[in-house]
Image: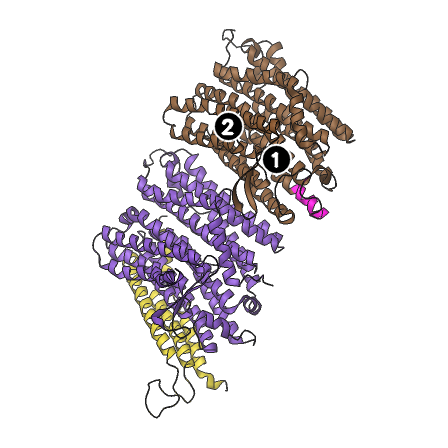
Chain colours: A brown, B purple, C yellow
Amino acid sequence: MSPIMAVIIPFIGALAIALAARHPRLRDTLSFLLPIPLFLIVISVAIIRLGLGDPMVQPLIELLPGLEITLAVQPLGLIFALLAATLYLAATPYAIGYMRAGGYYHLGRFMACYAIALGATMGIAFAENLLTLYVFYEILSISTYPLVAHTGTDKARAGARTYIALLLVTSVGLMLPAMIWIWQVAGTLSFTSGGILAGQIGPGAGAALLVILLYGIGKAALMPFHRWLPAAMVAPTPVSALLHAVAVVKAGVFSVLTVVLYIFGLDYVVTLVTQPVMLYVAVFTMLAASLVALHQDNLKARLAYSTVSQLAYIVTGALLATELSALGGGLHMLMHGFGKITLFFCAGAIYVASGINTVSGMNGLARRMPLTMLAFFIGALCVIGLPPTGGFWSKWYLVSGAWSAEHYVVVAAFVLSTLLNIAYLLPPVMRAFLKPLPEGDTKPVRIQEAPALCLVPLLVTAAGTLVLFVLADPALQMLKLGIAS
Amino acid sequence: MIDTITEMMPFIVLVPLIAGPICALLPGRGLPWALATISASVAFVLAAMTLGAVFHGETLRYAFGDWAPPIGIEYRVDAANAFVALLITGMAAILLPWGKALVDDEVPERQGSFYGLFLIALAGLLGITLTGDVFNVFVFLEISSLATYGLIAHGQDRRALLAAFRYLIMGTVGATFLLIGIAFMYILTGSLNMVDLAERLPVDEGSRALQVGLGFIVVGLSIKLALFPLHHWLPNAYTYAPTLISTFLAATATKVALYVMLRFIFDVFGPAYSFMALPLSAGFMALALAGMFAGSWLAIFQTNLKRMLAYSSVAQVGYMVLGVSLVTVAGLMAAFLHLFNHGLMKAALFASAGLIIYRTGSLRMEALRGIGRQMPWTLTAFALAGVSLVGVPPTAGFISKWYLISAAIEADQLWLVALILVTSLMALIYIARIIELVWLQPRPEGAPVVEEVPWGLLVPVWMLVAANFYFGIDTRLTVGAASAAAQALTGGVLLP
Amino acid sequence: MTVLSLFNYWAVVVLMMIGYYCVIVRGNMIKKIIGLGIFQTSVFILFISAGKVLGGSTPILRDGVSIYSNPLPHVLILTAIVVGIATTAVGLALTVRIREAFGSIDDDDLDAAQKDDAE
């Protein structure tokens, strides 16, 4: 049991699915089964890491002299991998159910690319150095492009074009040169506690590098490079759920956290003159995206902008450069993952069961889809940050971190953003439960949920947010292993 | 062992050279093709063995007729030209088996002479690569060029004739310039042997004649290299030539010209003189950048698939020359690396484009709308090769880009890094345009249904694509050889 | 050495410019090929005339001669002449084929015909 297996298995699975593309039963069976061994491997890797303390560093191949593609199990990465593997278990049945119910074609290509994206995510989670992370980051961008453009309509193509253009421009144009620069000055790209740049580079260069690298990680959706997220909404909902909870966005903020913690180092990053600048960029993103979300009637668009805002929470946590806030950022990665995937699952279920995709059309929906709306409510609580969901703990640590660093403006921003979250996440719930069905709705009022393949996963992830309320402490302890000084 | 390889090394050139006329006499289709393929494969094996022998810095020298240099002509092989020879023979060995169906389609008659010309062109390119005598370079250059003009003229479209003629004019002017440069070198020293010239050239005397000689050589080779703005022959030649020829040329012709230029500049004249006598560093850098931008920009607006790839080649030549213009060992290494990797990339791209044309009969992008579903394997190969061109890991293109950017950073030219990345993103635009066109757009009503090509045609293309990914992951061969090549040319001294 | 005594180099320059002019400016393909030939000839003269040793006689071994001119350039240029012939031959063959395919061998007509051809 080692990280390499976690990375390879999804790729092999993708190949198998691609070859079985013409045989729906075989293809679906393979797709259902693939998350299981992945989950088991990640769990066993976790046990080995936490129980024996063995990081299982695995150099794979020397890509360039002195630079190897290396995998290692680090606490932050482990959390990310666990998140991805667990949610993949839920997302696969959901995807199959949704795509079947929605009458989509080309499921072979879809599920194969899905699997490749998960393999790339594992590679990012278990990366030992920046080059490894970059390689898998790019594989992730490219493998998700066909997923976004899946339906092939004009809108889908335009959205996918924005998606891939923004991601590749930032990664090739900013992240790549930053990475080469770091390698030239520091002589290594390995993630090390305390960072590798302190003392190796002048203050001006370091400051510039921070900006270039943070913007280069386009998947973290810092404004103004956030447009790819709403543009990717043209994708079928299982893809949005994957993008906005599991793989792409979390890869982005995971990369930001990793870079700030293990390339720059918390102590070094506060000395950089651009750190407060980027901090305020993140805070601005947090608030601006929430404001935009308020005005979105399309449910998925609203959730997309909410994601932009929530990602900025994590970036803020990283840039506040205190242990507490970094812990909060890592925890929020986990909590937001579960919460957002629940919300997206619900949005997709609503669309598949009743054809509604706007907030204003959700009046009285709870009469038809009580379980879905209940799950939506719980997911919303998690994203807002209220007990009894896990989101409460991540918010708590983030705010505590800001307070302890005496960044009171940031604290105020967190509070304001929470209020905005309530303002855009609760109205759909209230409409569904409290408002009557729209006039002219002549269909019988009986419970008509989405198919079970869709319904069960969303209930499971909603329950997951409740479980995480209790399990937040073990997660926190795991994170502390990597973040404690 | 080294002696055996030294004895066998000239056969890299001799086997195709002898097989060429024999091939021209063979009737039918199968026999000429078989002879050509066997000759190319033999040459490839020999080239691989030769590279193995010189990998660690040795030099093989073979004097023809046992007449000792500098009076006699010799072949002199070190890591630099062994690497290039490997690329050329490798391309020939892979593309010839692949190209049979395409050649049968495009050049149905007199295949004996067609393959004979191909072998002569191959022998010519290899002769340029392996020789240690400057006049020999001229002779083989003209041999390969003449054969190439003939090969291009076999293209189905009548504009191939015009393309061949224009290439003839420009190519002959270029070769004649090279001859003038050689004349000056000979008049100054009385020698034609590269090693001997390196010792005898009066580099310290401020000789005007030497300066002019170098200038003519650089300009003449720049025409063959298709360095902007002397690239005008390339787009038409690559577009209208038969598919096998376009693919082969795109992967090899300009690379050999670059190698010869580097051999002259670094080995014969010496970098200290070359870069002082002429403003080569600034000149190359400016022209390389111009080529990168002009090539990428023009590629974006093309409506013909092969022409788009041709302009992309002009841009890629710019990258190689940019590495040279940095005048460091790292830059030179990046240039050699990109020489090899670009050969792989462009071969895969042109090959898959060729398969598309084979099935659809048209070069126009409009005819390609929505065929992704009908030719999935071919277009996936194209897409993956395109990914390598843009420079996304884990491909060979990424490795080239990395080394080029590293060399630029090491030389403190950070603005070059920005320009390299901008042009890479331009490459992304024209590749993505094709991918979107073939996959994400519906096939128009009434468009003919095309079938996927037989797997025999797909296998070599996928081998090239796999090579792109393989050399993007296991870089020991390519990086090691490029490094050895750079060391061989410069003696490992970091240049001022 | 006066400027006038370098007359061979002047000949080279003049021929080279004439040849180059023909290649570039003249639109008729035959004229281009002729120009190319003149251009190449100028280079041949450069080589050969540089091989003449002052006071030297023809490079054929015989009694009574102690200084010979350099025979090597002659040999080299023989090779180059052959190359030039081959180039001219290929060029003319292409011209014939172009005439068959396009009906003209003039640059302007050919440019127009090229534009008319569908992509």
On screen, residue C111 versus residue A78, left or right, reads left
Is residue A195 highlighted in magenta?
yes
Residue at point 79%, 31% (across, down): A406
User: Tag 1 or tag 2, which sits nearer the N-term?
Assistant: 2
Q: Amino acid at mark 1?
A: Ser
Label 1: how many Cα within 10 Å (few below 14, some 14–19, many 20+): many
Q: Which residues make up the magenta segment?
A: A194-211
- SS class of the residue under badge 2? loop
Quadrant of residue A137 within the rendered picture: top right
Q: Position of residue A438 (x, y in %)?
A: 56, 11
Q: Which numbered disc covers residue A235?
A: 2
Mark 2 or mark 1, whichever is nearer to me: 1
Label 2 crowding class (10 Å Cα cut-off): few <14, some 14-19, many 20+? many
- Label 2 and label 1: CA atoms lie apart by 24 Å
Chain under numbered label 2: A
Q: Decide: marks 2, 1 in contact (CB < 8 A)?
A: no
Point out residue B304 in the picture as x, y percentages from the top left corner.
Answer: 40, 47
Q: What element does badge 1 sit on? A: helix
Q: Nearer the viewer, residue A472 or A102?
A: A472
Judged from this view, the residue extending furthest toward the left is B27
**Which chain is indicated by disc 1?**
A
Q: Residue at x 54, y 52 (%)?
A: B404
- Is residue B220 visible from the viewing direction of this image? yes
- Above or below, comparing residue B69 to residue A480 in the picture: below
Q: Which residue is mark 1?
A: A255
Amino acid type of the residue that numbered disc 2 sits on in the rendered structure: Ala
Residue A227 at x, y percent in the picture: 59, 33
When the figure is inspected, residue A33 is found, relative to residue A54, above or below; the finding is above
Report the side of B238 relative to A161 (left or right): left
Residue A438 in sight: no
